[in-house]
Image: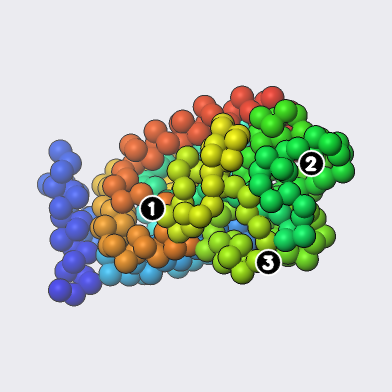
Amino acid sequence: MSMIKRRDLLALAVTALSPLAPRCVLAQSRYPERPVRLVIPFPPGGVFDAVGRPWAEKMKALLGTVVIENQGGAGGALGAAAVARAEPDGYTILLGGPATNVINATAVSRPRYDPKDLEPVSLLGSNAYSIAVTPAFPARTLKELVDLARSQPGKLSYGSSGVGSLNHLTGEVFKSLAGNLDIAHVPYRGAGPAMTDLISGQIPMAVASVTGQVIELHRSGKLRVLAVTSANRLAAAPELPTTAEAGLPGVDTEQFIGLFAPTGTSKAIIAQIAEATRAAMADRDYQQRLIASGFDPYPDSSPEKMRQVVEAEFAHWTPIIKAIGLKLD
């Protein structure tokens, strides 16, 4: 079956579910008529790229051409603002997460956009964080790290991908639950520089997203992951204990990654994108590709399910952001 026929059948199936189907079948059968732009609000090579680029590849046969545009800056706010202001015609989509839809809305006094201007479309996956140290670090378990930090207040530091990042917030939650540890935060301009300094020993530890690269660095001995913040052990690295198993329950941070459209985008177009995404996520090979990269895929998402996740994350992180007095401006 040709891409055009498959796309038309998908559009007809989606619009047929709507009471307005007779009036919008013709319009939806033509969507998309040109490439869709997926804005990734972070620099190339990061966690969001590892999810967004495979999704764009899968969409070629299910939706049409998707062009990736990395628009980093201000912790994801610049790219998110560009999408929030875009024409709500289905041709500009954001690959967002807690930074774009929770943290920037809570920790910025004059945000560049209102998260309500971004409509949830579909969840793609989530990934946990790791508490990682250099190979030469004396602590070999999370408990030993906590004991060492307590015995040497102010002597240790940890790196993150930036102030206000979920890495940063996870590090602060870890310090708090472990007894208000005195460990300095060292913010970097992205995850790459932080990992480079961790591997070279410039910093003793880091809170880093669990990706395929981090798993490989751990297995090759270039860094040591003491624990991961997921609720359960990772399918890609079952040898890594969770923070709860390592003696520190409550540090169960996972970052959701999903698609958002400008508010005002027609429900039929949103449903079409969500349905194409569900079809892609049903592919076992695609799921395994995400799992191998350290992600937990969402095979049965929907706009409403994604909305519930965003609301739950907002409720979870808002009091934490206020408690630590985080201000991003």
Pointer 1 or 2: first along the chain: 2
Which mark identifies residue 239? Answer: none
Determine whether, in the image, residue 295 is placed left or right of residue 225: left
Q: Residue furthest bottom?
A: 2
- Residue at image position (79%, 41%) is 148
- Label 1 crowd bin: few (<14), some (14–19), many (20+), radius 10 Å: many
Q: Choose between 162 and 240: the one closer to the eye.
A: 240
The amino acid type found where label 1 is placed reads Pro
Pointer 1 or 3: first along the chain: 3
Q: Is residue 221 visible?
A: yes
The residue wearing badge 1 is: 297
- What secondary structure is marked by label 3? loop
- Label 2 crowd bin: few (<14), some (14–19), many (20+), radius 10 Å: some
Determine whether, in the image, residue 134 is placed left or right of residue 4: right
Q: Position of residue 162 (x, y in %)?
A: 71, 49
- Residue at image position (15%, 74%) is 1
Q: Position of residue 13 (x, y in %)?
A: 15, 53
Which mark identifies residue 222? Answer: 3
Instruction: Determine the image quadrant of residue 247.
Output: top right
Determine whether, in the image, residue 100 is placed left or right of residue 207: left
Instruction: Determine the image quadrant of residue 164.
Output: top right
The amino acid type found where label 3 is placed reads Lys
Pointer 2 or 3: first along the chain: 2
Which mark identifies residue 148? Answer: 2
Q: Is residue 73 visible?
A: no
- Residue at image position (45%, 43%) is 232
Please report contact status of discs 1 and 2: CB closer than 8 Å, yes or no: no
Please report contact status of discs 2 and 3: CB closer than 8 Å, yes or no: no
The amino acid type found where label 2 is placed reads Leu
